[in-house]
Image (tube, rainbow, N blue to C red):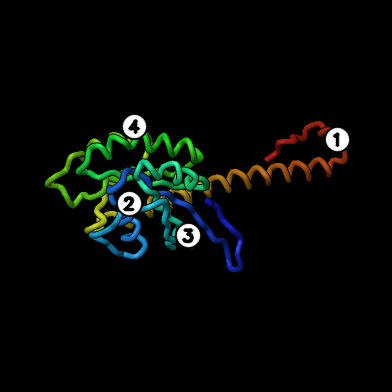
Amino acid sequence: MGGREEEEGGEEYLFKIVLIGESAVGKSNLLSRFARNEFDNNSKATIGVEFQTQVVEIDGKEIKAQIWDTAGQERFRAVTSAYYRGAVGALIVYDITRRSSFDSIKRWLDELSTHCDTAVARMVVGNKCDLENIRDVSVEEGKSLAEEEDLFFMETSALESTNVQTAFEVVIREIYNNVCRKALNSEAYKAELSVNRVNLVKDGANTPKEGFSCCAR
């Protein structure tokens, strides 16, 4: 579900992004804050999967981000694993006040790698940074893990709306850049093949003439 479609008036981009991490780290409130600017103090555990679609603009292009909120509870993981398919971005969320949720990040990364393409744009998110007084995971530990695993990193607060918009936009921009790089490489290769075919036809022979390179650029 990551790609672009030609539509009247230009291209439309639709990217599937998954929110993963242990239960009660605040994934649902991160999504509701980003999509609707809402926060629910009485938010209940997600059952299965829910998603929201949010439109953002990048480089003058309209990007539709379809963000899936997956259940963190172990008993639902077999159900939600199917929903990784087609994802081109992921936010792996932990609660800065619960070390166990941080320690599980590598397991979630392994699961992501099992079900998704290696080109997935990934960010590790330390949520609930408003609870500094009961912090159990330092900023430095979050940064270190991100550097070790080659991830983006950001601390957020869904409650106070700290860095929520920025976190999602960083991932969406990285997906957009990945798509553009792939398209550029693909189109350049197609153009090269096209030029080669034209030159060979002009020569009127099955083999290149002296001084002619079939790989002319």
Foreground: disc 3 or disc 1? 3
The reply to whether callout 4 and callout 2 are in contact (CB within 8 Å) is: no
Which numbered disc, 2 or 1, marks the residue that appears first in the sequence?
2
On residue 27, the disc is: 2
Measured along the vertical axis of the image, is residue 136 above or below residue 8?
above
* Residue contact at pointers 4 and 3, CB within 8 angstroms: no
As rendered, which of 12 and 99 lies closer to the eye?
A: 99
Crowd band around label 2 with a 10 angstrom C-alpha radius: few (<14), some (14–19), many (20+)? many
Residue at horizontal 56 percent and vertical 55 percent from the top: 4
Q: Earlier in the sequence, mark 4 or mark 2?
A: 2
Disc sitting over residue 206 in the figure: 1
Of the residues under marks 2 and 3, which one precedes in the sequence? 2
Which tag is nearer the camera, tag 4 or tag 1?
4
Characterize the local packing of mark 4: few (<14), some (14-19) or many (20 or more) Cα atoms within 10 angstroms.
Answer: few
Query: Is residue 192 left or right of 45 when viewed as pictured?
Result: right
The quadrant in which residue 190 appears is top right
Residue at the spot of label 4: 148
In the visual, does 128 lie left or right of 64?
Answer: left
**Which residue occupies the extreme front position in the image?**
75
Location of residue 95 in the rendering, given as x and y in whole percent from the top left corner = 25, 45
